[in-house]
Image (cartoon, rainbow, N blue to C red):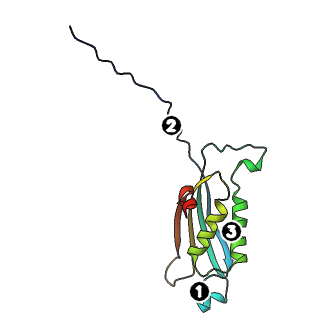
């Protein structure tokens, strides 16, 4: 006589795979930025591309602007950063941008790409791109 070996398997609900992403593409500000003397005279074009991953439980409510990540609010913060502080490096501007963006606790990660389109002759742009998760940000 054969014995039947049964294994009890616990079924778990499927993991939520929802991913909500907010992006700002080719947002341009004109401001003084750079460490070279010629960069401190004339405003330069600064181009931002930002991808923001939002907590998957953040759902929009059509009657409440606060229920979403407001990209207009983010662009105003970026404008104020560049207007109120003189930066030598795009990297420093990116780090201050993370500080502003991660103030919203619903944001789980951010990728920031900042470029100076007119920085190098015969190149379409030069810049920096940095990705940080909330845990990366909170450890720094």
Q: From what the image shows, is residue 75 above or below residue 87? A: above
Query: Where is mark 3, residue-wise?
Result: 78
Q: Residues within 10 Å of mark 2 (few under 14, many from 20)?
A: few
First along the sequence among labels 2 and 3: 2
Q: Is residue 36 left or right of residue 5?
A: right
Residue at the image point whose x is 61% and y is 91% from the top: 38
Q: Seen from this angle, which residue lies furthest right?
A: 63
Residue at the image point whose x is 67% and y is 73% from the top: 29
Q: Quadrant of the N terminus?
A: top left
Query: Where is mark 2, residue-wise?
Result: 15
Q: Position of residue 140 (x, y in %)?
A: 55, 64
Image quarter of residue 85: bottom right
Query: Where is mark 1, residue-wise?
Result: 35
First along the sequence among labels 2 and 1: 2
Q: Position of residue 39 (x, y in %)?
A: 62, 87
Q: Secondary structure at mark 3?
A: helix
């Amino acid at each position: 006589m054969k014995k039947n070996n049964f294994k009890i398997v616990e079924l778990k609900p499927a993991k939520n795979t929802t991913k909500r992403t907010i992006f700002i593409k080719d947002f341009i500000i004109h401001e003084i930025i750079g460490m070279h003397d010629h960069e401190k005279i004339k405003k330069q074009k600064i181009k931002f591309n930002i991808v923001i991953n939002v907590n998957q439980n953040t759902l929009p409510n059509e009657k409440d602007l606060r229920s979403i990540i407001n990209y207009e609010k983010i662009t105003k913060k970026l404008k104020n950063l560049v207007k109120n502080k003189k930066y030598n490096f795009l990297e420093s501007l990116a780090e201050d941008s993370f500080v502003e963006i991660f103030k919203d606790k619903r944001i789980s990660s951010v990728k920031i790409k900042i470029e100076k389109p007119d920085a190098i002759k015969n190149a379409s742009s030069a810049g920096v791109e940095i990705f940080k998760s909330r845990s990366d940000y909170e450890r720094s």
